[in-house]
Image: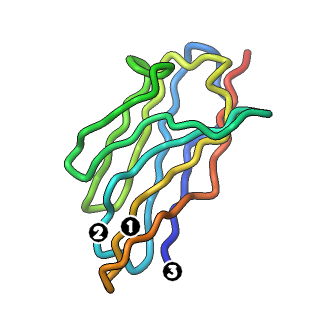
Amino acid sequence: QVQLVESGGGLVQPGGSLRLSCVASGSILSLNAMGWYRQPPRKERELVAVISRGGSANYADSVKGRFTISRDNAKEMVFLRMNNLKPEDTAVYYCRAGVRLYDFSDLEVWGQGTLVTVSS
């Protein structure tokens, strides 16, 4: 059983910052690409940022220059630093990971989500 647990969401004023964390647990041989997605109210889930095991990152155009994704492979964690937050960043943020298990099978795992609300 593999789990991803996010934390760090909350209410923040426009222009503020938050740091989301996601930790993986379970019978994990290795974590491949990890990413953050979000689902704004009444909209589809969308990619925010993704990072490879080696640290190469890609971002949605809407967050470039404001958000930074990073990871700690030893701690099996991925982070999302969000600066200069805007009301349109309000969403449930989900962590996703590609997981290789000890039997060398691959699994896609999602966290349960953490709510970020940007409002004055």
Residue at numbered disc 1: 99
Q: How many numbered marks have been drawn onto this rendered protein structure?
A: 3
Which label number is shown at residue 30?
2
The amino acid type of the residue labelled 3 equals: Gln
Residue at numbered disc 3: 1
- Left or right of 116 on screen, residue 27: left
| Disc 2 secondary structure class | strand
The answer to the question of whether label 3 and label 1 lie on touching residues, with beta carbons closer than 8 A, is no
Q: Which of the two residues, 38 or 67, is positioned nearer the viewer here?
A: 38
Does 35 appear above or below 43? below
Where is residue 62 drawn, in percent x and y?
50, 19
Graded by Cα atoms within 10 Å as few (under 14), some (14 to 19) or many (20 or more), the crowding at tag 3 reads few
Does 1 appear above or below 8? below
- The earlier-in-sequence mark between 3 and 1 is 3
| Disc 1 secondary structure class | strand
The amino acid type of the residue labelled 2 equals: Ser
The answer to the question of whether label 1 and label 2 lie on touching residues, with beta carbons closer than 8 A, is yes
Q: Which of the two residues, 10 or 68, is positioned nearer the viewer here?
A: 68
Q: What sort of colour scheme is used for the picture?
A: rainbow
Graded by Cα atoms within 10 Å as few (under 14), some (14 to 19) or many (20 or more), the crowding at tag 2 reads some
Where is residue 71 drawn, in percent x and y?
31, 48
Q: CA distance from mark 1 to mark 2?
A: 6 Å
- Left or right of 17 on screen, residue 90: right
**Residue at image point 34% right, 72% down:** 100
The answer to the question of whether label 3 and label 2 lie on touching residues, with beta carbons closer than 8 A, is no
| Disc 3 secondary structure class | loop
Where is residue 85 drawn, in percent x and y?
56, 19
The amino acid type of the residue labelled 1 equals: Val
- The earlier-in-sequence mark between 1 and 2 is 2
Which label number is shown at residue 108?
none
Graded by Cα atoms within 10 Å as few (under 14), some (14 to 19) or many (20 or more), the crowding at tag 1 reads many
**Residue at image point 44% right, 59% down:** 23
